[in-house]
Amino acid sequence: MKETDLLEKLRKIERLYAGAATAGEKEAAAEAMGRIRQRLGDVAKVDKPIEFRFTLMDGWAKKLFLALLRRYELKPYRYARQRRNTVMVRVPRSFVNETLWPEFLELSEVLKTYLEDVTNRVISDAIHKDDGEEEVIAGEYLGG
């Protein structure tokens, strides 16, 4: 997958969660963002924001999640002594369930696939073309 293909796929996911009917480049993306922010504002009037804790084990996933929160003008934080992979945010539950988390999962899967493809290509081109798994041998591991 080319980077331009990746970017278009990410934009399509954003338009999907914004309920966009058209796909006109930057204008459509800006309109989609506006619709999502408007929906978040409307939801917050009925479904009051509550504190959520997310634990993201992958550094790439955390960066993506933080970017998504900030795009929606949500303020991620964590308390002192919480682990670095913890992200806290105050947001309506329905927005998390209907928009934020499903969109994050889709974006994360697309990004993970892209990063895996790039990693495999770079290793194959620069290190060694054999991408097979290691041999499994009979016997018991004795440590060391």
Image (tube, rainbow, N blue to C red):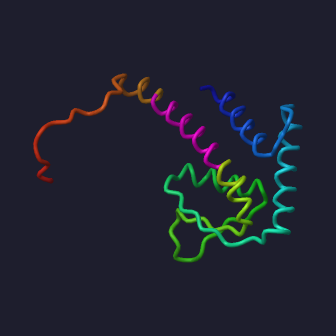
Looking at the figure, which quarter contains the N terminus?
top right
Q: How many marks?
A: 0
Q: Horizontal placement of 11 versus 122: left or right? A: right
Which secondary structure is most common in the magenta stretch? Answer: helix
The single residue placed furthest to the bottom in the displayed view is 80
The magenta-colored residue range is: 104-120
Q: Horizontal placement of 25 versus 124: left or right? A: right
In the image, what residue occupies the spot 53% across and 73% down?
82
**Picture coordinates of residue 125 (x, y %)?**
44, 23
Q: Horizontal placement of 113 versus 134: left or right? A: right
Q: Is residue 98 magenta?
A: no
Say if 85 sits above or below 134 in the image. Answer: below
**Picture coordinates of residue 72 (x, y %)?**
77, 56
**Picture coordinates of residue 31 (x, y %)?**
88, 44
- The quarter of the displayed image where residue 52 is located: bottom right
In the image, what residue occupies the spot 72% across and 32% down?
8
**Picture coordinates of residue 32 (x, y %)?**
84, 44
- The quarter of the displayed image where residue 123 is located: top left
Q: Horizontal placement of 93 versus 26: left or right? A: left
Residue in front for this viewpoint, 122 or 47: 47
Q: Is residue 110 magenta?
A: yes
In the image, what residue occupies the spot 57% across and 41% down?
109
Say if 16 sits above or below 64 in the image. Answer: above
In the image, what residue occupies the spot 69% across and 59% down?
96
